[in-house]
Image (cartoon, grey):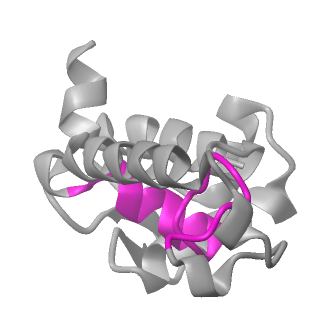
Amino acid sequence: MLITKASEYAILSLIILSKSANPLRSETLSNDLQIPKSFLAKILQSLAKSDILKSYKGVNGGFSLAKDTKDISMLDVIKSVEGKTPAVFECSPSIKECPSNKAHICSIWPFLNKLQGKIDIFLGELSLADILEE
């Protein structure tokens, strides 16, 4: 579940918004990205609730970045949109919370847990500014 369409659309929207001097309406972003407006509107609202975007009402309303691009981590974006930390596997960071209740006999749990930790660090350090540079 690492990157879903919702996360992808959030990142694409943030890229467009980072290049705009003025707030953009969800309709504009929806048309530019060819994404269903209702789906994108939910994504943008999640980003606004997480203080990644600012939301403006009215005729000249829309969305703009609430932070500098270097202060927007991909981990925060994905957590905002997905409602949880992105997971590569359905594996818990705690043996006691294993969804299959077999962590005590699982020989790959330590590896998966270590891998997930590295991915979390990477996404936490990867900013929107980094993506814009590539």
Nearest the viewer among 41 and 105 is: 105
Q: Is residue 73 magenta?
A: yes
The answer to whether residue 130 is above or below residue 87 is: above
Q: Is residue 59 visible?
A: no
The answer to which quarter of the image holds residue 130 is top left
> What is the x, y in percent for residue 109?
58, 54
Q: Answer with left or right where residue 37 lies relative to residue 133.
A: right
Image point (79%, 32%), residue name: 34
Range drawn in magenta: 72-93
> What is the x, y in percent for residue 66?
25, 68
> What is the x, y in percent for residue 47?
48, 70
Image point (52%, 78%), residue name: 94
> What is the x, y in percent for residue 120?
36, 53
Image point (84%, 72%), residue name: 100
Query: How many discs appear?
Result: 0
The answer to which quarter of the image holds residue 17 is top left
Residue situated furthest front in the rendering? 105
Q: Is residue 101 visible?
A: yes
Image point (56%, 57%), residue name: 86
Q: Answer with left or right where residue 89 lies relative to residue 20.
A: right
Nearest the viewer among 10 and 84 is: 84
Q: Is residue 57 magenta?
A: no
The answer to whether residue 16 is above or below residue 24 is: above
Nearest the viewer among 75 and 87 is: 87
Nearest the viewer among 61 and 114 is: 114
The answer to whether residue 82 is above or below residue 34 is: below
Q: Quadrant of the C terminus?
A: top left
Q: Answer with left or right where residue 119 lies relative to residue 59.
A: left
The answer to which quarter of the image holds residue 51 is bottom left
